[in-house]
Image (cartoon, grey):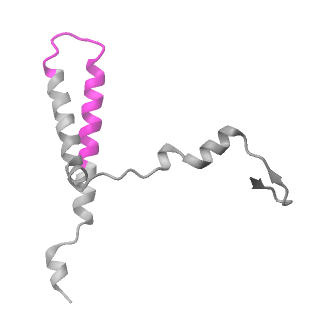
Amino acid sequence: MISTAAGKPIALSETQQVDRKTGSLATKKIWLPKLLYDLLPYFYLGSGIAAFFATLYISEWFWVLPHYLLFSAACVHLGALVYRRRRSERPKASNLDQP
């Protein structure tokens, strides 16, 4: 039950109750094992490069060619972005030695 500004409770519909209990999929945290988390940027880069080379083997203009190029550009960009952000946030060993 939600209360209004006047303090009167308002009943939620069934859909609102389910949504309130489960939350949105976009707001849920996903926990990955450390190995998968560490390999994620390399997976993105590998997928992007593989998709780019797959476009080289398409001999004719098919409808899927622009999709391969877009997917490869997005994967390479995302992989480089994740890799760069993780590298910049890691503390350097030389900084840990100083008091």
Going by the image, does 18 lie left or right of 52? right
Going by the image, does 10 lie left or right of 77? right
Quadrant into which the C terminus falls: bottom left
Residue range corresponding to the magenta coloring:
56-80
Going by the image, does 85 lie left or right of 9? left
For the image, the number of numbered tags is 0
Principal SS element in the magenta part? helix
The picture places residue 39, in percent across and down from the top left corner, at 19, 49
Going by the image, does 44 lie left or right of 24? left
Residue at the outermost bottom position: 99
Q: Residue at x 25, y 52 (%)?
A: 37
Q: Residue at x 86, y 59 (%)?
A: 6
Q: Is residue 62 magenta?
A: yes
Up-down: is 2 above or below 64? below
Q: Residue at x 49, y 50 (%)?
A: 27
Could you say which is closer to the camera, residue 40 or residue 23?
Answer: 23
The picture places residue 41, in percent across and down from the top left corner, at 22, 47
Up-down: is 30 above or below 59? below
